[in-house]
Amino acid sequence: SGSQVSWKLDAVAQLTKFDQKKKKYKGPSVQISDESLDFSYDDFAQAVAETDYSFNRNDIVPGVCVEYDKGGCLVDIGAKSSAFLPEAEAALIQESGSSIETLVNLDEELDFEIISEEDENG
């Protein structure tokens, strides 16, 4: 029978200098103060909570197209999140090959009909 030699391996790996610094780094320290504001964060939260964002199916609401998006555009209707106007519903009569950019202008206020209610994502 031969003799057995066992080696004890060090389970702790040596960290590189970068990893050592990364481990100690706690991120930027940002001090936020609301002293220069005319309202506090609590006032803002209360104002948001008191704002009525209730829209019902078939309501006609004013809105502004703010951004073209794939297949339509985002419309600011004064809600917590933007509404979406599908390209297919941007005009009653559309010329063949027309795009959302030719159907509605950005930053122009128009009336929009709510055709579906918000989902669980708002």
Image (tube, rainbow, N blue to C red):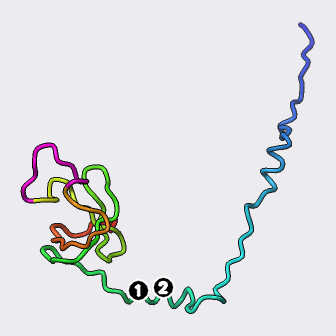
Q: Residue at x 43, y 89 (%)?
A: 47
Residue 10 place in picture, x, y as percent: 87, 34
Residue 108, disc: none
Return the residue found at the far top: 1
Query: Considering only vertical position in the picture, is 21 above or below 108?
Result: above
Left or right of 88 on screen, residue 27: right
The residue closer to the viewer here, 105 or 55, is 105
Residue 12 appears left or right of 44: right
| Quadrant in the picture for the C terminus | bottom left
Quadrant in the picture for the N terminus? top right
Please, is residue 94 above or below residue 110 in the view? above
* Residue in the picture at 36% in, 87% down: 51
Image quarter of residue 16: top right
Residue 58 x %, y %: 12, 74
Name the residue type under label 1.
Ala
**Horizontal arrangement in the rendering, residue 34 relative to residue 90 (left or right):** right
Q: Which region is colored magenta? A: 92-102
Residue tagged 2: 45
Q: Residues within 10 Å of mark 2 (few under 14, many from 20)?
A: few
Q: Quadrant of residue 105?
A: bottom left
**In magenta stretch: residue 96:** yes
Percent x, y of residue 87: 20, 54
Q: Main secondary structure of the magenta part?
A: loop
Label 1 belongs to which residue? 49
Element type at mark 1:
helix
Residue 13 placement: quadrant = top right
Closest to the observer: 19 or 8? 19
Q: Disc 2 and disc 1: Cα gap in Å?
A: 6 Å
Residues tagged 2 and 1 counted as in contact (Cβ below 8 A): yes
- Look at the image and say whether residue 90 sits in the magenta stretch: no
Q: Amino acid at mark 2?
A: Ala
